[in-house]
Image (cartoon, rainbow, N blue to C red):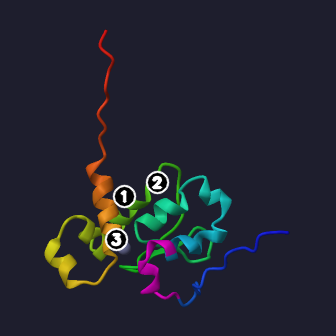
Amino acid sequence: MVPVPLIPPIDGSHPDFIQLQSESARLLTFHDWPSSAGHIVEPRDLAATGLFYTGHADRVQCAFCRGCLRSWRPGDRPDQEHRRHFPDCPLIRGAAGDADFRASRTIDTRQQQQQAVAASSTFTLTSRLVR
Ligand SMILES: [Zn+2]
């Protein structure tokens, strides 16, 4: 018995951008993400910042601003690259806390909440044993 690979219902050449506004749908597109690229950037980090895999080389696209990113290099952070190249992206702007913009657009609020939680927990308290 062998497991049947999960085939994503996404056509890379005609992607459904509405469907891809869901992080879980984006994650499914990385089922054939090249392992060479996987050593540099992880699918979950790409999907978390709105990106899905186009099926070509290491080229990904944002479901919100439709900007493409490729040629990932060691040390690249998907969220930082997304912000740097596409600062006007609705997802990037929404995550930055622009409430008016967020209210005027229908985007994945669940993901925004996750990002807000992640942003608020970027520091950790270290407790020490006192002798
Ligand atoms: Zn974008």
Magenta residues, as a range? Answer: 15-24
Residue 2 position by quadrant: bottom right
In this rendering, the answer to whether 118 lies above or below 102 is: above
Closer-to-camera residue (123/51): 123
Check disc 1: other Cα within 10 Å, few if <14, some if 14-19, many if 20+: few
Q: Select label 1 or label 3 by which is in front.
A: 3
Q: Is residue 91 magenta?
A: no
**How far across and how far down the image is residue 115, in percent?**
32, 61
Q: Which mark is residue 97?
A: none
Q: Can you identify the residue that label 3 sits on?
A: 110
Which residue type carries mark 1? Gln
Residue 89 visible to an observer of this rendering: no
Q: Is residue 19 magenta?
A: yes
Q: Can you identify the residue that label 2 sits on?
A: 76
In this rendering, the answer to whether 34 lies above or below 9 is: above
In this rendering, the answer to whether 49 lies above or below 106 is: above
**How far across and how far down the image is residue 49, in percent?**
40, 66
The N terminus appears in which quarter of the rendering?
bottom right
Q: Which mark is residue 80?
A: 1
Residue at the image point whose x is 61% and y is 52% from the top: 39
